Amino acid sequence: MADIIKLLPDHVANQIAAGEVVQRPASVVKELMENAIDAGSTSIKLIIKDGGKALIQVVDDGVGMSETDARLSFERHATSKISSAQDLFNLETKGFRGEALASIAAIAHVDMQTRTSSNEVGTHLKIEGSKIVSQDVVATPKGTSISVKNLFFNIPARRNFLKSNQVELRHITDEFHRVALVHPNIEFHFYNNGSEIFNLPIAKHRQRIVHIFGSKMESRLVPVNEETEVVKVSGFICKPEFAKKSRGEQFFFANNRFIKSPYLHHAVVAAFEGLIKSDTYPGYFLFLDVDPSSIDINIHPTKTEVKFDDENTLYAILRSTIKHSLGQFNVAPVLDFDHDPNLDTPYSYKEKGVVIPKVTVDATFNPFQEAPTKKNTGNSFRKQSTKGWEDLYEGLGNQNDHNEFSSVVIESESEEQGTLYSDKDVEEHLASTFQLRRKYVVSTVKSGMLVIHQNRAHERILFEKFLGEITVKEGVSQQLLFPLELTFNKQELAVLQEIKESLTNIGFAFQSLEEETVKVTGVPMMVPESGIGTVLDRLIADYMEGYADSSISQAEMLAKALSRNLAVRTGDVLDQESQLTLVNNLFACKEPTLSPFQKITYTIISEGDIDKKFN
Ligand code: ADP
Ligand code: MG
């Protein structure tokens, strides 16, 4: 057989390598900004058009390149940063592989202008898909400007894979944050579609964080400082009461490089133990300085994962350092984190029932439906229950055996049930319900016992309600007497602007979304006034977390987030009426069986199953 192995031509090899280095516009931003920093710049401009699909440009005032270097910089494995393998263990620069520019030039149209201080004129190079299109002499300021246009122009599959401009912009912003946070001694400007979205003057770390994440950060930051033989830790943690639902503002930097480390993250979370709720995450900006030879940043092509020599020690130091800071700044003892008044909803009567079995209930309030009175509950039930729900009850109608259940009701008052069922119409159609361990709502159906997961069921109900409202724009808005002022950072504002229309459809009203301080003038009926800030914060967080998943629509994502944040939870006591409405509304849903998060909402334990237990 003839020989069949060939060496791949350079441009093909470059394209393959590009697949690793450049996943999306944000990867280009990262590489170009890092090169600018390695070049000793004091001011860096980032210019983006259409989420980076049309243009990514980075302009720096660094050392620039000679004519030869300018050409060489686009060769694969061409780098000025290391010359031997030994150098790898002593890295002071961000780059070292010498493949970023080669990769980018293989899959885009690149235009570079660069000049060193010792040269009067600079070099202007145009490269398209690894081919040099032109090279000229140019008058240009000292430093380098690289524009990357038409990313993935020669790999349509990759180009099609890119997300919406908004989503790509958010990835770019994430990268921008990571670079800007750790270099407060460099000035940054960030322009998107012609408008400046960040202007970061040279500052101290704390100020840089505030410039990026908004002035509300100022009062939240607690400094962290510790120097040991193994590591120097500096930076800030956010006070526990500002812990968020999302993993947003969590940054580790090792030797000025953004890193991801689930292990060290755990150390931070452990230090916050007992101070924050288990489903929230503390914010932190932590800078670790270690001996460069004790860290291996080479294990991942996109270089956010690192390996430390002695991770266990690092863990212990980090944890105790943060605990110390929390203690020193006395943020620990004053908190009552168990009680978040913002989350209180009128249907949660937590703990009250313990004192006297008779609970004062606002009988006119029913979170599950618009109609407020008991009588209407029955009526609306009959109107709504068309989807298989009646089948479940068929044959139960006049049997009174369901009353046996009401006699074992533990958490509701039995007299209340009497009144509830005295309405003949209702009695004909409804079995009684009771709540089990503040988690399930139990009822009888024709074939046995129906057990509903209250939280998931309510999520399903709200999900369909909000989805409907977002699409048909019929959300009922409750106007606020006094507009509520809330502050958001730029990233949060961008999300709000993006989802504004949907939010308006479900009943939110905003005066303007241009400034950090947003005036809320109306909210959906469901949202208690005291909880508006929390709901919006969580909504934004959920939305940002979900943004990578473009397979679902904005409306769906929003409806999911709203349902998750507004649904009754396990542990909430539901009064009799709410239980019934929950059951009714669940089975009026299009897809009652699953929660919006694909979890089972109810199960039926058949008579046969029960019989077996008695064998
Ligand atoms: P690496 O950064 O790993 O060395 P790159 O492909 O990113 O590889 O860059 C190749 C080389 O081009 C760098 O080593 C550097 O010498 C030069 N270079 C790239 N960008 C700049 C810049 N903005 N200013 C000065 N030199 C640069
Ligand atoms: Mg580089």
Image: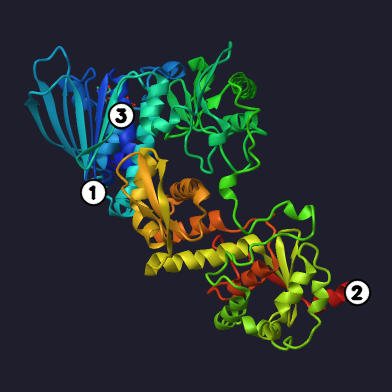
Residue 408: x and y, percent?
Answer: 83, 69
Quadrant holding the C terminus = bottom right
Q: Residue furthest right?
A: 615
The relative height of residue 119 versus residue 491 in the rendered view (above or below) is above
Using the numbered discs, state the Cα–Cα distance from disc 2 to disc 1 in whole angstroms: 70 Å
Crowd band around label 3 with a 10 angstrom C-alpha radius: few (<14), some (14–19), many (20+) = many
Which is nearer the N-term, disc 2 or disc 3? 3
Confirm or deny contact between disc 2 and disc 1 (CB under 8 A).
no
* Residue at disc 2, secondary structure: loop
Residue at figure coordinates x 34%, y 18% from the top left: 185
Instruction: Residue 492: tell me if it is visible.
Output: yes
Q: CA distance from mark 3 to mark 1?
A: 22 Å
Q: Which mark is residue 614?
A: 2
Residue positioned 80% across, 73% down in the render:
405
Kind of residue sitting beneath label 1: Phe
Residue 104 found in image quarter = top left
Q: Which residue is mark 1?
A: 153
Which comes before the other along the chain, label 3 or label 1?
A: 3
**Residue 33 bears which disc, if any?**
3
Q: Position of residue 424 (x, y in %)?
A: 69, 85
Callout 2 amino acid:
Phe
Camera-nearest label, 3 or 1 = 3
